[in-house]
Image (cartoon, helix red, strand yellow):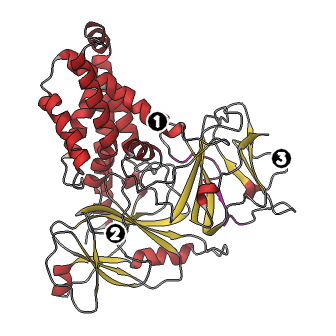
Amino acid sequence: MPSRKMLLSAGVRGVKRVLAIGIAVIGLQLAHADRSTALADAAKPDATNASAAMIAATTRAYVETFYPLWIANHQFSLSAKNSMVGPIRVTPAYRSIVSINVDTIYAGTVMDLAEAAIVLTLPPTKVTYSILTVDAFGNVFDTGLEAEAGTYVLTGPDFDGHVPHGLTEIEFPVNASLFIIRADKYSSSNVDNRKQARLFRKRITTQTLAQYHNGDAPEKTRILPSAVYAPPFKAAADALIKVVPFQFLRQLQEAVKSEWTPPLSKAEQKVSDKFDTIFNGGNVTLAEKVIMATVMRETKARIQNNYYDAAASTNWIHFSNIGDWGDAVLDRASVAEFIQYANSIETSAYYHAFSDKKGKALDGSDKSVYVLKFSKKTVPDVNRFWSLTAYTPETQILITNAQKKYAVASYTPGLKYEADGGLKIYISAKKPAGVPKANWLPVSDKRFNVLLRLYGPEGDVGDYEPPAVRKR
């Protein structure tokens, strides 16, 4: 089993790799800024040209369809395989996955079932937890594995071996997937279960089926230093698209063909084949390259705007099709941009606000105090918990604050409800006078956004809309 020193070294290497990407991007920006402007001016596409229109449409469809794979391919490549790991703690230093939650104790791995079946043991616990299996696109699939103690054999679609007596086979529809267990820190009655949740996580074990047959000891979950989770994959993607979008397209094409990408649907394969033809291994004319680069940037904006445009009347963004996308590839790309690897709506519902009731961006720069006021009827109805977490708007990471407090939740100790059963949450850079500390969500003196999570949503979530965030 790798030592802690080895794991730390691996984490640092991962950080250095992504930092190297960032440094390279900055270098490219300095080297190519003037040249890019000149090239764009010299080769602006003719909007009436049929060939230019076809290249633009093909590139747009390609990026919308496969955008999630660029980030996922880097994440999968650097992640542990068939061996459960989890961060020692989640803080603003955690940047590998956007909009990370602080409500649960994480354990996860990339399940690579192409070469071997994996024996997974879930220990008994009274802690509530959920299991997420999701492919590189963000498609959530139900394997039938329940949150119940037992020993299971996880098999891929090509498995033709024998499952030992007494073990339960769990068939995965794809060979490569992200497998995440989230154990609640607090019970539904607000009992502090953090110690038990950490113990449960540590006792989860994995080993290959061959190792099981050999009588080898299984491997327990490894708890990794925060540095391992520092690589900012979304920020790296943003920088690459902004500075050298054609290079992003080249890397995206590699991701589409990666071993971590699930088999493409007929529609996806058609989009891929058409783009491969016009991309021609990168051997395109200057004019064609400029068209693709321009459309790449425009499509990135379109992916973001599709997310913002989903805001309802109270300016909360909600997608009910997470993980079950059908042909909604633009939604799939948008959610990957802001809440990658989210659960399906049966497990949790997500509501995201970037602006207040008047449509103005949430911003703590003018000492603003915002209030999210729930009436008794609009307090989220859940069988696990609800939480409100604040993030930075560009990178979707937790906001650094002196209190090291990143959420206000149903389980927050000392949370004060109104006499009528309602609840007020105050959001500001400094705690307002007279406001209970438990009801205050610290943010920075810059723009921010807030994400409301409902774990174990009850009732018809489709009819639920949180009240608007208002400026005090």
Of residues 368 and 451, the one nearer the viewer is 451
The amino acid type found where label 3 is placed reads Ala
- Residue 88 appears in the rendering: yes
Q: Position of residue 118 (x, y in %)?
A: 24, 75
Q: CA distance from mark 1 to mark 2?
A: 32 Å
- The numbered dot on residue 304 is 1
Q: Position of residue 221 (x, y in %)?
A: 36, 72
Give the residue number, with chain letter if any, for mark 2.
84
Q: CA distance from mark 2 to mark 3?
A: 45 Å
Q: Residue at position x 21%, y 74% from top?
A: 117
The reply to whether the C-beta atoms of the residues labelled 1 and 3 are less than 8 Å apart is: no
Q: Is residue 451 left or right of residue 356?
A: left
Q: Few, some or many C-alpha atoms within 10 Å of disc 1 (few <14, some 14-19, many ≥20)? A: some
- Of the numbered discs 2 and 3, the one sitting upstream in the chain is 2
- The numbered dot on residue 433 is 3
- Of the numbered discs 1 and 3, the one sitting upstream in the chain is 1
Magenta span has 409? yes
Of tags 2 and 3, the one toward the viewer is 2
Please identify the quadrant where the C terminus is shown: top right
| SS at circle 2 | loop
Q: Is residue 113 above or below residue 127?
A: above
First to last magenta residue range: 397-413
The amino acid type found where label 1 is placed reads Gln
The amino acid type found where label 2 is placed reads Met
Q: Quadrant of residue 151?
A: bottom left
| SS at circle 3 | loop
